[in-house]
Image (cartoon, grey):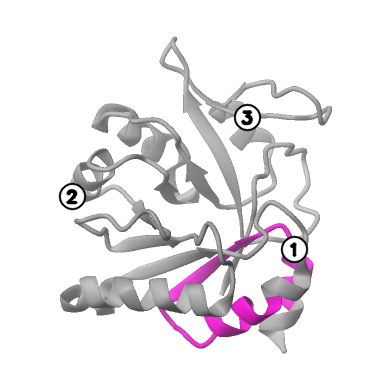
């Protein structure tokens, strides 16, 4: 199970939790340059180039959040810039994500109570938005299985842990334990990296 530290936008040299990867926000600015959010002071974000971030970050891999409807040119540019450090790209609106996936890019299709894409990709980002409990994760997981049964053996999952934007380990533990039972779930995004490691290593 790969542990991915959530929203590492206040990155500094050093991967203090020893996470396999960092989940970061990347934007294409008006000048066409790829920039990552950077929040060194805890107040305002200061965008830095992705190249500079990769140069100074101690994370070996990255899971990239793109909240833009980018065309294939820029999505390919992101893939080329990160190279073998990239796990995948998510939050790109459909159908752009679908066309990019068909072109061979590592796109993740987001699934929640409100998002169940007609054409699911081979990689799925499982992220319940309301009832973040084992039952909700399992129901969405099974829904994805029903809709992708022909390609189920090739489907990969990364899950957002419960209380993604907070620190509530008691809610996270049952989901982590559930995720460990499914070999197709290969990654967990969480702020509680140390606590999650203890659960999955027990």
Q: Secondary structure at mark 3?
A: loop
Disc 3 from disc 2: Cα separation: 28 Å
Considering the image in quadrants, where does the N terminus appear? bottom right
Disc 2 from disc 1: Cα separation: 34 Å
Q: Is residue 42 above or below residue 181?
A: above
Residue at x-position 73% and y-position 39%: 11
Where residue 132 appears, as percent x and y from the top left, is 58, 67
Q: Secondary structure at mark 2?
A: helix
The quadrant holding residue 92 is top left
Give the magenta range: 173-197
Whether residues under marks 2 and 1 lie with C-beta atoms below 8 angstroms apart, the answer is no
Label 3: how many residues lie within 10 Å, few (<14), some (14-19) or many (20+)? many
Q: Earlier in the sequence, mark 2 or mark 1?
A: 2
Residue at x-position 24% and y-position 49%: 101
Label drawn at residue 66? none
Whether residues under marks 1 and 3 lie with C-beta atoms below 8 angstroms apart, the answer is no
The quadrant holding residue 73 is top left
Where residue 18 appears, as percent x and y from the top left, is 73, 61
Residue under circle 2?
Answer: 102
Label drawn at residue 192? 1
């Amino acid at each position: 199970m790969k542990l991915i530290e959530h929203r590492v936008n206040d990155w500094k040299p050093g991967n203090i939790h020893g996470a396999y990867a960092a989940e970061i926000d990347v934007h294409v600015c008006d000048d066409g340059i790829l920039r990552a959010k950077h929040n060194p002071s805890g107040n305002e974000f200061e965008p830095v180039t992705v190249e500079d971030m990769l140069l100074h970050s101690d994370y070996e891999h990255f899971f990239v959040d793109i909240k833009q409807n980018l065309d294939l040119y820029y999505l390919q540019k992101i893939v080329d810039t990160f190279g073998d450090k990239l796990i995948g790209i998510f939050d790109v609106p459909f159908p752009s994500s679908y066309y990019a996936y068909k072109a061979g890019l590592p796109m993740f299709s987001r699934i929640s109570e409100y998002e169940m894409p007609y054409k699911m990709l081979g990689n799925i980002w499982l992220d319940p938005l309301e009832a973040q409990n084992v039952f909700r994760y399992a129901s969405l997981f099974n829904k994805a299985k029903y809709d992708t049964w022909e390609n189920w053996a090739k489907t990969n999952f990364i899950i957002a842990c419960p209380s993604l934007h907070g620190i509530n380990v008691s809610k996270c533990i049952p989901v982590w334990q559930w995720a460990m039972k499914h070999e197709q779930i290969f990654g967990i995004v969480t702020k509680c990296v140390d606590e999650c490691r203890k659960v999955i290593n027990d």
